Image (cartoon, grey):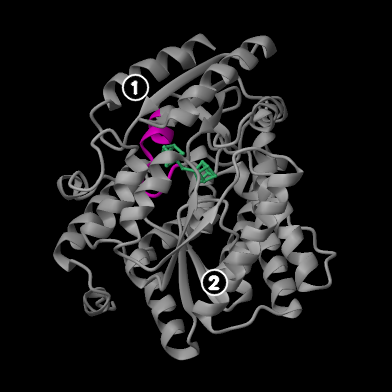
C-alpha cells in the first residue's frame, strides 16, 4: 500500500479535509455501485478508476510531469478539445465539480443562487481538496453559461487560466470565430508545454481520442437491447472516467466492456430483467461523485439506457475527421467536430431536441427524464421545448431540478417512482 499523503501535501492540499472527502466518496460508491446485482465483470475497471481517482492516477500524472516534463491542462467543459492538449504533449483532465465543498468560503466570492457545479469547483479550489486542480499547470475555461464565465473571473485569481470564447449561435461567421479560438488555444497550450504541435502529433492525438470515442460508441450500442447488459450508473461512470483516466488504458477497458456486453446481448443476459422500464436521461452534466439521480432512478426499478448530456452521448457521438494532412486542416476538423456539440448555450438549439428524440427511439426508451442543476437557466428554459417535443412524439417526459445535496432525495424518489409506474 502506497501512502499518498506526502504527494497530496506536496500538491498543497488540505490533507485532513481530503481524507474526509475520500471516505465520503468511498461510502457513496459502495452504496451506488457495489450494491448492483449482475454487473458485467469487466466493470471491475470502473472500481479501479474510482479507487485510484485521487491517488494512483494523480501519482502517474505527477510522475509524468517530473520525468518527461509533461504539463497537466484542466478544464470544465466539453468544448475544450483534448486532442490539442494531447498533441502538445499535455495531459488533459476534467476538474472536480460534482460535490458541495467549502460552501461558506465560496459564498464570499459567488452569489448563493449559483449553480452547484460552479460552486463546487470554486469550493474544491478554496478547500484545497481536488488533486486535479492542484496538479494542473493551466486551466482552460470557456465563455458558455453566464455563471461559469463570470465565476472564471474569480477562479483566474487562483490558477493560471486561458478562456475560450464559445459562440452562442451557429452560422458561418461564428464558425470562423470558433476556428480562430481553436488556434488561440493551440498556441496557449504550446506555450505552456513548450512543445510545438506537429502534423504527426496532432494526427496521433486525433486517432487516440477517436479510438476512445469509438469504444464508447460500441458500448452504448449494446444498450439498445432488452434486457440491457449494463446499468446507467456504470455507463455514466465510463464517460466520467474518460475525463480522468489515461486514454489508451480507458479505450482498452471500454472495448473489453463492449465485448462482454455484446456477448451478454447474444446470451440474453441483463443487469435488470427483460421488460424493465427504460429511461433516457438528458440534461446538465453529472460530474463525479454526483451519482444521486442515476442511483435513485435505477433504485426505483427503472434502468437508464442512454444519456444525452456532456457526461454521456455528447462526449462520444462525433469523431474528428481523420483525413486531414496539415496541422491547419486538422485544427479545422477539430473545430468542426466540437461545433456540433448541442449545448443549451446555443440559441436556437434544435440539434439537442433531435438527438433526444432519435435516441429515445433507437434505445427504445419508455420515458425521458430531463434534469437541470438548480439555477441553470439554460437547461431550465430548454425543458419547455423538450417537453413539447416529447409530447408530440408520444414519449412520457419528466423534468427535474436538483442540486448536490441529499435533502431532496426522498421527494425525488417519490416523484421518480410515480413516473416509472405511470410509463
Ligand atoms: S458543453 S453543458 S459542459 S457548458 S449546469 S455550469 S450550463 S448553470 S455545465 Fe456544460 Fe460545457 Fe454546455 Fe456541456 Fe452553467 Fe448550467 Fe451550471 Fe452548466
Front-most of 412 and 296?
412
Residue 382 belongs to magenta span: no
Residue 293 position, x and y percent, is 40, 32
Mark 2 element type: helix
Q: Which residue is mark 2?
A: 188
Quadrant of residue 414 within the rendered picture: top left
Mark 1 element type: helix
Tell me the CA gap for discs 2 and 1: 44 Å
Is any atom of residue 63 visible in this view? yes
Q: Which residue is mark 1?
A: 412
Front-most of 250 and 65?
65
Quadrant of residue 13 within the rendered picture: bottom left
Residues in magenta, as a range: 286-296
The residue drawn where x is 54% and y is 48% is 40
> In the displayed structure, does residue 56 sit left or right of residue 266?
left
Is any atom of residue 214 visible in this view? no
Quadrant of residue 88 within the rendered picture: bottom right
Q: Quadrant of the N terminus?
A: bottom left
Front-most of 386 and 218?
386
Residue 26 position, x and y percent, is 29, 53
* Disc nearer the start of the sequence (2/1): 2
Amino acid at each position: 500500500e502506497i501512502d499518498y499523503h506526502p504527494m497530496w501535501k506536496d500538491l498543497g492540499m488540505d490533507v485532513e479535509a481530503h481524507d474526509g472527502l475520500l471516505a465520503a466518496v468511498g461510502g457513496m460508491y459502495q452504496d451506488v455501485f457495489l450494491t448492483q446485482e449482475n454487473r458485467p465483470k469487466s466493470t471491475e475497471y470502473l472500481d479501479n478508476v474510482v479507487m485510484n481517482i485521487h491517488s494512483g492516477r494523480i501519482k502517474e500524472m505527477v510522475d509524468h510531469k517530473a520525468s518527461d516534463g509533461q504539463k497537466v491542462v484542466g478544464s470544465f467543459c466539453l468544448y475544450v478539445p483534448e486532442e490539442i492538449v494531447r498533441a502538445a504533449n499535455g495531459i488533459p483532465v476534467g476538474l472536480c465539480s460534482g460535490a458541495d465543498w467549502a460552501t461558506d468560503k465560496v459564498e464570499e466570492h459567488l452569489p448563493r443562487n449559483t449553480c452547484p457545479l460552479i460552486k463546487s469547483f470554486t469550493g474544491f479550489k478554496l478547500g484545497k481538496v481536488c488533486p486535479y486542480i492542484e496538479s494542473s499547470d493551466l486551466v482552460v475555461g470557456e465563455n458558455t453559461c453566464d455563471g461559469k464565465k463570470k465565476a472564471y473571473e474569480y477562479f483566474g485569481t487562483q490558477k493560471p487560466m486561458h478562456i475560450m470564447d464559445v459562440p452562442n449561435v451557429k452560422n458561418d461567421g461564428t464558425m470562423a470565430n470558433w476556428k480562430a479560438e481553436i488556434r488561440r488555444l493551440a498556441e496557449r497550450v504550446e506555450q505552456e508545454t513548450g512543445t510545438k504541435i506537429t502534423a504527426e502529433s496532432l494526427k496521433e492525438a486525433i486517432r487516440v481520442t477517436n479510438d476512445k470515442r469509438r469504444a464508447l460508441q460500441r458500448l452504448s450500442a449494446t444498450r439498445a437491447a432488452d434486457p440491457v447488459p449494463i446499468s446507467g450508473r456504470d455507463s455514466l461512470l465510463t464517460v466520467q472516467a474518460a475525463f480522468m483516466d489515461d486514454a489508451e488504458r480507458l479505450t482498452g477497458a471500454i472495448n473489453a466492456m463492449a465485448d462482454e456486453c455484446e456477448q451478454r446481448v447474444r446470451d440474453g443476459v441483463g443487469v435488470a430483467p427483460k421488460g424493465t422500464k427504460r429511461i433516457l436521461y438528458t440534461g446538465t452534466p453529472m460530474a463525479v461523485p454526483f451519482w444521486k439521480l442515476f442511483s435513485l432512478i435505477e433504485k426505483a426499478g427503472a434502468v437508464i439506457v442512454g444519456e444525452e448530456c456532456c457526461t454521456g452521448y455528447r462526449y462520444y457521438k462525433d469523431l474528428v475527421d481523420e483525413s486531414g494532412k496539415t496541422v491547419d486542416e486538422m485544427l479545422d476538423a477539430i473545430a468542426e467536430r466540437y461545433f456540433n456539440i448541442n449545448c443549451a448555450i446555443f440559441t436556437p438549439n434544435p440539434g439537442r431536441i433531435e438527438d433526444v428524440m432519435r435516441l429515445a427511439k433507437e434505445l427504445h426508451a419508455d420515458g425521458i427524464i430531463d434534469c437541470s442543476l438548480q439555477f441553470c437557466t439554460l437547461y431550465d428554459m430548454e425543458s419547455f421545448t423538450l417537453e413539447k417535443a416529447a409530447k408530440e412524439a408520444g414519449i412520457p417526459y419528466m423534468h427535474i431540478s436538483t442540486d448536490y445535496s441529499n435533502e431532496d432525495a426522498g421527494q425525488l424518489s417519490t416523484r421518480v417512482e410515480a413516473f416509472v409506474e405511470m410509463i
